[in-house]
Structures are given as C-alpha cells and as structure tokens.
Amino acid sequence: MLSTMQDVPLTVSRILAHGERVHGAAETITWTGGPEPHRRTFAETGARSARLAHALRDELGVRESDVVGTLMWNNAEHVEAYLAIPSMGAVLHTLNLRLPPEQLVWIVNHAADRVLLVNGTLLPLLAPLLPKLPTVEHVVVVGPGDRTVLEGASARAHDYEELLAGRPDTYDWPETDERQAAALCYTSGTTGDPKGVLFSHRSVYLHAMQVNSAESFALTSADIAMPVVPMFHVNAWGLPHASFMAGASMLMTDRFLQPAPIAEMIEAVRPTIAGAVPTIWQGLLAELEQNKRDVSSLSRVIIGGSACPPSLMRAFEERHGVTLVHAWGMTETSPLGTVSYPPAGASGDEAWAYRLTQGRLPASVEARLAAPDGSFAPWDGATAGELEVRGPWIAAAYYGGADADEPLRPEDKFSPDGWLRTGDVGTISPDGYLTLTDRAKDVIKSGGEWISSQELENHLMAHPAVAEAAVVAVPDEKWGERPLATVVLREGAADVGYEELRTFLGERVARWQLPERWAVIPAVPKTSVGKFDKKVLRARYASGELDVTRL
Amino acid sequence: MLSTMQDVPLTVSRILAHGERVHGAAETITWTGGPEPHRRTFAETGARSARLAHALRDELGVRESDVVGTLMWNNAEHVEAYLAIPSMGAVLHTLNLRLPPEQLVWIVNHAADRVLLVNGTLLPLLAPLLPKLPTVEHVVVVGPGDRTVLEGASARAHDYEELLAGRPDTYDWPETDERQAAALCYTSGTTGDPKGVLFSHRSVYLHAMQVNSAESFALTSADIAMPVVPMFHVNAWGLPHASFMAGASMLMTDRFLQPAPIAEMIEAVRPTIAGAVPTIWQGLLAELEQNKRDVSSLSRVIIGGSACPPSLMRAFEERHGVTLVHAWGMTETSPLGTVSYPPAGASGDEAWAYRLTQGRLPASVEARLAAPDGSFAPWDGATAGELEVRGPWIAAAYYGGADADEPLRPEDKFSPDGWLRTGDVGTISPDGYLTLTDRAKDVIKSGGEWISSQELENHLMAHPAVAEAAVVAVPDEKWGERPLATVVLREGAADVGYEELRTFLGERVARWQLPERWAVIPAVPKTSVGKFDKKVLRARYASGELDVTRL
C-alpha cells in the first residue's frame, strides 16, 4: 500500500533555498591574510549562486548533466559553486590541486569538464595543462592572479565577477530527480587510474542531515564551522552543504593553510567546530607552543583522513581545552562513516579507549566484516575482517567516464551483493565501535586466519634495539601466506638476535602469528608520502635480494 | 546523469536493525507503578520484534499492507509493535484511546484493521465495540487485564506473550520500497469524519533523522527520552523511532499519566528530554509545588499540541531549572514542523520573544503564507497568511480507506500544486521563525485583508471590565466579512459602553480592524474541551438571537 506523503525530492537546491532564506544572516567568512576577513552572508550567497547559474547557462551554455570543474581553495566563491552547479542540474567536479599534473589532466579528460572555475592564484598550475584538456571550453578566473598566462589558450577566459555582474538574483531551480548526479570527486589510489565517485542529490542531502545530527558533528545556527579539510577532498566532508542546511556560519582558510595563519584566524573569528587531517593539527600544536593564541572557541575538532596520534589528542585537550574527535570515512562513503564519541557513562581510561577507535556507526551506514574464509566475523571487538559497508551515501560503483556506457565495478571494491569493500581491516565491538588495524592488502592471510602486520610491527618497534620494523606477507606452500619480519636496528643498540626478538613478540601475540622469516635491513623503503612501501619489500623478497633467516 | 551511489531504501527495518545491534544495551524503561520500573534492552526489543513479526505472519496470517491496530499505552510492547509491524511490510495503525467509542469504531472500520493489539487494562473499552468491528479477526492482549470480557467475541483472542513464546529471534525483514505505507494515524477534526494520514517508511526515517538533528531534539545515546505524548498521537512525535535510531533510552509512562507518578518517575529514572502537551506540564508544575521532586535531569522539554503559556515556561526555568521548548506540528506533518530555540546571540527579552514563537523551519519543511488575495505574504514578521507547507514528511492527501481506490484530497486541505494547507494563520520573520495567531476559520477576511480575531480578543480581555471576549466574522455586504465583538462583562465591574471599548481597542490596533458590531453576552459558548465555540456564536448572530449594537 503506497503512502500518501508528499513525494518531494531531496536536492541541493532545497539546501540552497533554505540557507538563503531561513539563515540569510549566517556568513561565509574567508581569510584574506589581511587584518579583516571577507564576509558574505548566506542571503548574498544565494543571490550570487543564482547569478552564477544564469551565467553558466546563458553565457557558457552549461546544460543538465554537464560537468563543471573547480580548481579552488576553500572560499566564499567555492561555496557558490558548491550550491549553484548541482542546483542547476549540472555536476560539480572538485579538482585536487595537490595531484601531479599528469593525474589532473587524466581526471579532467575522463570527466570531460566543459568549464573550469579556477582561483587566480592557481593559474600557474592550470595554464600549462590547458593544451592537454580538449573538453574545457571555458576557464572562469576567480579572484586575483595574473590572467596573462591564459593568453593563447583555446579555452575562452572569463572573470568570475564580470560574468556574474548584472544577472538576476533568483533562478528557477529545476526539481531534479534526487538520484541524479550532483558532484564528482576522484580518489587517487596508489595503484591504477584515479576513480570517480559520482554523488547524488539524495546522498549529499542525507549526508548533510547526518553531519548535523547530534551524534555526528551536531551543527546548528549557533556554530561557526571551519573546514580546514580542502573543498576538493570529498566535498570538505560535507561541511559546506551541512552548514548551509543548519545555518552554521563557515570560516574558510582560502590558501592560508600554514599553522601561523590558522592559529591567527581561529583566534580572530572564533570557530566552534573544525574538520582536519591530523598533520595540520600537529603543525598547529607546534605553532601554539611558539606563539600563544586562544583556540578555545573550538568545542570539537573532527579528525579524519588517517588515525590521530593519541598524544596529539591529549595535548590539545590538556593544553588548549580542545577536544579532538576521531572519525572515519573515505571518498566512497561521502565520507561520513563513523564518529568516535565515547558512550554514555564511560569516563577516564575507558572513555579514552573508545575515543581512540574509529568510532560508532550511524543508522544509515550498515557494516559487516568479511573474514578470509568467506564468512562474516562477529562483532566481538576481537575478530578481524575486511570492513564492507552499505547505505544511501555509499558508492555502488565508480564513474565510467564521459565516454563509457557503464559504471566501473571492480571486484576488489564491490561485493557481488553490492556492498562497498573498504580495503580496511579491523574489528567492531558489540556496541558498534569500529577499530581499524590494517589495510587489507597489508594483512597476512595465513591458513584461513588473518595476521595483522601493523600489530606485529608495533610490538617489534617497542623493543629497545629496534628502530623500525615492517612486516609483509610472503607466499607459503602450507599456509598460503606467512609473515616476513624485516627490522632496522638502532644505531649503537646492543646486539640482538632473531631468537630474542621472536621471544619478545611471543610474549605479546598468539604463537601461530609469529614470523618464521626474519631479515635485518638498513632502512625500510618508503613511499613519496613517507609510508612504508611494502610493495618494494615484497619484490625484494621475491627476487632474493633480502638475506632471510628462517627460525 | 545518474549517480553511482547505492540505492538503499530508507526503511523502519533499518532503524530496528541498527538500534538492536549498535545500541543493544540501551533500554526502554516502562513505569509500572511499583518500586522498580520494567527494563527491556534494545537487543531484547529487536529479538522480540522478530518474534512478534513471526507470530503475526505465521499464526495470524498478516500479509504485506495488512493493517494492524494498537490500542495501547506508552510501553515496551508498543515499541515492539512500532518496529515489527512496519518492518514486516504491514501497516501500524495507532488508535487514540481517548476518542468517543463511535469514532473508534468508524476509524477501525475505515482502516480495516485485521488484528488489534490491546493493553489488558483497555479491554473494558474495546470489548463492547468488537461486535461493530467486522474486519478484526484477532485481538492480541498485552499485559494484565481481565480477558473474560472477550468471551463470545467473533474475533479470536490471544495472549501477547504466549503468541511470541518460542518463535525465532531473527526475521528476514523484506527490503520494502521506501514509499510504501509504514504507519497510519487518524486526525479527529472538530467537523466531518476523522482523516487518516498514511506515513511512509521514507517519511518516518527522514523525520527520525530530523528529530535527532542538533537543531531539533538532538537525541544521542547519552539521552533518556521521555515521550509523555501518547504513542497514538502522531507516532509520539517520532520519539520511539528516533530514539532507536540514536540509541537513546526511553522512559515510558504506561498508564501512569497523573502528575504525581510523572514526577516520581522523572526523579527515579532521570530522563534528559521529554515531549508533552502544555496541560500535562501545567499539572506537573502544580504537583511540584506540593511535593518536592528533583526533575532537573531534564535538559529540555519539547512542548507541542498547543501554544505553551509563557508563565509555565518561566516557572519551570526559574524554579526547576528545566527549559521548555516550543514546537509546532500536526498529524499531517509527521509532526515535526518548527522548533523554537532562539538564534545565536539572542539573550534576555529578545531570546524570550523568539522562544514564544512556534519556532524555526528546518531545511526539509518549506513554508509559504497564502494571503487572502491569492498572493504569498512576505516573511516580514508582520504580514499574515495561511501557513502552507511542503516536504518529504508532509502529507499529500488522506487515506481513502480500505474500500476506496483513491486518496482524499479535500481542497481546503491541499493546494492545487500539492502543498498542505495547515489551517493555521500567522507570520514568518525574516529569519524563518513562525508565529501562529489564528486558525484560518477564525480569521476575518475583510476587503482582501485579514483581521486576527485572537488579537482583538486578547486586547479586549485586557480591559478591566471585560471577563471574556470572542470575536467572530460576520457577513458584510461591502467588505465581505467584518468582525463582531461579543463581550462578557465582569461581575461588579463599572458600567462600560461599547464606545469606550472601541476607543480602548482603537489605541491598540489599526482603525480598519475595529469592529462595528458589538454585543454583550452572558457567557461565551464553549466546546467540550473548553475552547470558544465560534460556530455557535456565528449561528446565533445569523438567527438574530444576539442583541447587536452597531457603532
């Protein structure tokens, strides 16, 4: 029996119309590096979003489902693009300005961006690439920057403010189907081509509601939200859309991402909530040791992207009165997966143990742990499995590209019954807290059981003679895979034998997890971002380069 | 371009599975009148909901879209019905046990309930009606009560616990289309037949997300929510579903709705949030003056159903440290429409002025004010119109009944473009706060302008000689309608003429709003619930019964 409720689609234009009208006095506050930040009200943002949509449609010929790229910092104009482009029925494609140029070229061509909005300060990055971007017909330059670098380009150049000038303050936003694409964001995996995730109006809207729920980021019109996370990084974790929905003002960093200006803008504008990766907050902590700034307006800082060092969480809490909150997600999950507030009643060490997990699942994110034997692991806080998730803001596939008829559904990323395989291995406690321990590709699959390479490494590195340890899976005839332990000894440390290390480890993990293969190496090979490069280690083992001792 | 996100429906079974698994230790705490309340965990509730679904399907033959009624107090078993019945694909029909018997009969027959779950203590109410309820095949009795009154009934009688005993703890919940009906609730208007609102899985789910948003009721797993509002009253304002979604425990009153046990259970169980109509809280205030109880665990009490007297809000705040929060909604709006927290920065009298409005609109509830001339009134906080709303949890029509092919869409309730006409007249401020002043049927439509009868009444009743005043619209050749002022004079008050009252009013409202027609009456006729009965007054005027003076 069908219900008799209204069939109203969940669209970005609803968020825009609401923020503009009900929270017209809320502001996007963009740092300028000068004494006064730039302030633009949500009412103005609404009017300017309408002007932008008119310009894109009437002047640049943007039609429904056309892709419009942005190569921009976090600022008021980027918020306008976030709202106007999906609301008019086009697709917002945020470009990661930190990618290697050849990846940017690949991504723009794959998405077939017709128009690019670019901050003037980023023109030196874009201009040399334009000859390789045949789909780009228009480049719209936002803010100051030397436009002469665009001379000779085949794409037409425009100035953002000139384009908007004189156009109507309102736009008759189409009532888009909520399953239509609203935004596009590419993940840059370490292997293979980048993969595009095509968010829907529905997923953006529901995700913003979840961000605003009290159990997640809890935004209200009393907040000033500070997305330090870039707007090209999974929609800035949904903060711009969620802020517009809740009427929370926003503090935008623009290009001022160094610790000193971040400390300065927090003291000046007094945001109540921020979202950032741990490295930024590590830098901020160091800055605050040098130069005293009041950052106590921050009641909570959501930390995602990678696990947050406990020392960092404690330092901010004890020295600056700022609570860092762990969260987990990925581009394919929009990204809100889990947020780690301790449960009611937990305090002291128990609360800290909860806070160091990745967090608790919300109702819209179903999870299961795929064990190596094809079963699903119990939620006992101990049995590990690869995390698979399902929900209305989780990807079912990757964008196939402008020339493809079908989305991409690689087997290692999507289960046959449609769940996303996250590639993360971990446990879930009986009360729904997720703890991640490994990337699936780094786990050792030994006789139907999993051995956590990260756990073995952490224990080994606790031995006084060990500077670094990397554990990788190597093929084993009997067990499928077994761990190989490679260790870098501390300079001047007492001579230590493999037997001693093995005994040390044996006191900390189960016997069947103990490596048989050991090698001392001069240094652990690292990737360009400083992570252990286990591919290289496995290759060295395979080629016989390592001097391996078998115990 | 279609997105590549998962197409996962928003269903009640998702809420059930989530609460059961992630928040298994949360509890439904039901007051028993004895020293210890009854406690049931969400994990147990999940298992028992599965058993209930098995019993309904396998034993009672309930199929998809069948309607299952509940005639129950707020308690743990009613929560099981809330979760199990929609999750299995059937429709939960909550019956208002305060309705006159003939209305109950009409409603059960219109909805064609096949099964009724009834609290044993309510059997004396139900048993005499059963012969008039031919669609009811099964009566399931929950909890203590004399079952002998069911002897001789044609419907089969069952005991709830016996029915559940031994059935499986899990159920393979169907993946229902989110637009399917989940729940049915009838409004009892003062005129005409009751009207059924058929909520969808989608509307229940989105509404629960909104209840849990920080700007609305902000439930988290740290809360104990106390729905004093009955579960037969618009799904207890969504609190049971929202609590299960957020992992908030619940305190249920069962049949103990008198001020003394309510005060006792608040002190004993320490709920953090409650939802109730003002009269209940008025009674509680009086009780607390008599018997000291600690109710300070309540950080917020949502007040809806009718406007809350400011004196009540102030008394709770000042004497008991409890903040009463105004909210507005109706059965047709699921009911969450507006919630009245003052905006950031407001304090003192300004904050109080905001708190006395009906509240601010959330993103999913669009509003407009229909003016008498067919235009829409501006949001200036002054120009009134009839409130019309639109959104994913707002009704588009009423249920036509089991024998009807079409839903009911009366013109006075739904606009041609599909918005709900609320029948409430009021203003909206530039920052999206709604203030209701009148019911549309009580407004005087005079020459294309509206005159608020309530405003005139309030001013008249401020005159020292006036005990009561009721203003109604009467036909007028020139203006369409004009106000007729009827006044009840205070006993022993100085003689007062109409001229004086008119002058008194003229100092407070615009000249064109002043009534020309006046009558002194011995008492204002009242409805059975004590409201002014303006129908009767208009009829008396039309029949010439009133002694009217024209100024």
Image (spheres, coloured by chain):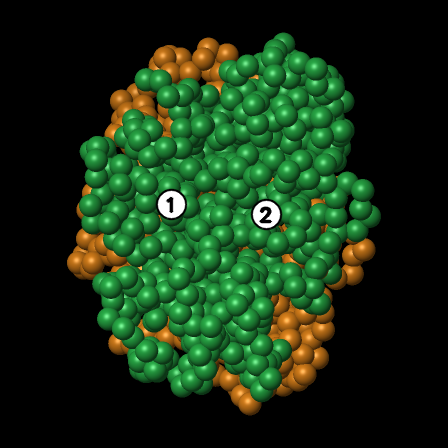
Chain colours: A orange, B green
Q: Residues within 10 Å of mark 2 (few under 14, many from 20)?
A: some
Q: At label 1, which amino acid type do we have?
A: Thr
Q: Would you place residue B335 above or below residue B176 in this image?
A: below
Q: Are marks 2 and 1 on the same chain?
A: yes
Report the residue at 67% width, 39% height from top.
B107
Q: Which mark is residue A157?
A: none
Would you identify the image quadrant in which residue A520 lies?
top left
Residue marked by disc 1: B279
Identify the residue shown where x is 57% and y is 81%.
B476
Q: Which type of secondary structure does the marked residue at label 1 adopt?
A: helix
Callout 1: chain: B
Visible in this render: residue A378? no
Residue B248 seen: yes
Chain designation of label 2:
B
Of A485 and B188, nearer the camera is B188
Determine whether A301 is above or below A75 in the image. above
Please tell me which residue lies in front, B302 or B313: B313
Residue occupying the point 71% across, 67% down: B416
Quadrant location of residue A1?
top right
Amino acid residing under circle 2: Ser
Please give the residue where the numbered disc 2 appears in the rendered image: B188
Question: Measured along the vertical axis of the image, is residue B442 above or below residue A39?
Answer: above
Label 2 to label 1: alpha-carbon separation: 19 Å
- Which element carries disc 2, helix, strand or loop? loop
- Residue A95 place in picture, x, y as percent: 56, 63
Who's the residue at 33% across and 55% down the image? B309
Q: Position of residue B337 (x, y in %)?
A: 50, 56
Q: Is residue B282 left or right of residue B103?
A: left
